[in-house]
Image (cartoon, grey):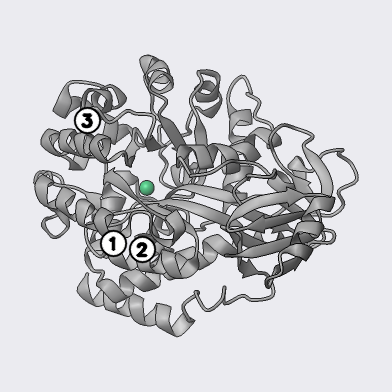
Amino acid sequence: MSRLLVEGGTLLGLRQPGDVRPGDLYAEGGTIRAVGEEARRLAAVAGEPVEKLDAGGKWVLPGFVQAHLHLCQTLLRNGPEELELLPWLERHVWPGEAAHDVETMGISARLGLAECLASGVTAVLDMGSVRHADALFRAAGRAGIRYTGGNVLMDDPETTPVNLRARAADGLAETERLRSYWQGRDRGRLRIAVQPRFVVTCTERLLRSAAEYAEEKTLLVHTHASENRSEIELVRARTGSGNIAYLERMGLLTSRTCLAHAVHLEDGDFKRLADRGTSVAHCPSSNLKLSSGVCPVTDLRAAGVRVALGSDGAACNDRLDPFREMRLAAFLPRSANPPRALSSFDVLRMATWEGADALALPGEQGLVPGGRADLVLLDPEAGWSMPHDWSPEPYGAIVYSMGRENVFATVVDGVVRYRASDPTVMGLKPSPAEVREAVRKLKSRM
Ligand SMILES: [Zn+2]
């Protein structure tokens, strides 16, 4: 059983503003057992090797959650500019995904997961490709991160390239094969999500059977929705209805569903999402790079919809960096007319607590006894974020001035998975030569 003592830090629990106190933290078996003086006492009597993190001068907070990611696209980073969603998918992403073999998929996942851990991320919701999802789970197992993912489902012959298409029954059979092997492995850190890519690439038969299957197995549903104007027009032309309303009709709007983007919403959609308890993963960098638009985050939150944050894939971002997404998420509402408010505390909640709820992570939240020991330790004196004397609370500094250069350590399930002193991320990060060779292979098949 893992035992970890985090000594001398300042705990930012994020339960409510002002939830900030100095103190030690002791975790056993991935669960926080004590904070404050009791932490050292329990560590002393544990009688077993206790991993120690000297957190003197550091800020300790719940780990960041990436609520929308494509690890299969990390090797497609720094691709074409000035393309909107549909031509970008057709010209860059789909040919790249189809070119993967099991080795290149593993390299792509390790590169992305190393970046996530080095950025303070402790849990990801990852949309895989049609094939080779086992390589994603293997990489996530090696990283020790909380990983929810699986194969992507796309079956519509009119919109899906032939080399990335699987019949509805075959795609779901693959999800079931993955579930029967991976679900709950690594102490529950690895989990399956049912992932129709988006309405445009899926037949009605696929969407309905995906909804039934997810319900039967109590699995998370992850899909893209209403990201781009051409996409929603195409959906209306094909189905005669709005995209979110159509997903509801297919049975895919549930409290275990996380929709990526939700940029172009109709009036009734806010209530629809709130009534169903469906979460939204806001991906501001991706939405701006692909000229998709801006998600109405403050209206969604006001309607009672849970909004988490995601980077989307490296092919459209091109960083897997929660600090960049938090900063943009805080700024974008102020560009509305009239300006809207979204505080740095609210943004931090979206990047942590709301994300964990959107992923339905097991266990309790917060830096309290019984809480999940998924932590990020920030060094406020590293990088370029000093001074911190002008605000009584630390949230603005994290959202506006810090970056991953401030990440001192990342803890998942009570185990240290990244230390700033080890840029290889415990050997997880592939070497530049490995990355170049994997990209050469992809290009030779595209
Ligand atoms: Zn995406």
Contact between marks 2 and 1 (CB within 8 A): the answer is yes
**Residue 384 seen by the camera:** no
Q: Which mark is residue 137?
A: 2
Q: Residues within 10 Å of mark 3 (few under 14, many from 20)?
A: many
Contact between marks 3 and 1 (CB within 8 A): the answer is no
Q: Residues within 10 Å of mark 2 (few under 14, many from 20)?
A: many
Q: Which residue is mark 1?
A: 133
Quarter of image, res 44: bottom right
Name the quarter where the C terminus is drawn. Answer: bottom left
Q: Residue at x 15, y 52 (%)?
A: 173
Examine the rendered structure and indicate whether residue 249 appears above or below residue 168: above
Contact between marks 2 and 3 (CB within 8 A): the answer is no
Q: Residue at x 64, y 54 (%)?
A: 375
Alpha carbons under labels 3 and 1: distance apart: 28 Å
Q: Nearer the viewer, residue 71 or 176?
A: 176
Secondary element at image label 1: helix
Q: Which of the two discs, 2 and 3, labels the residue nearer the N terminus?
A: 2
Q: Within 8 Å of ligand 1, the CB of disc 1?
A: no
The amino acid on which the numbered mark 2 sits, given as a three-letter code, is: Phe
Examine the rendered structure and indicate whether residue 189 appears above or below residue 276: below
Secondary element at image label 3: helix
Examine the rendered structure and indicate whether residue 365 appears above or below residue 143: above
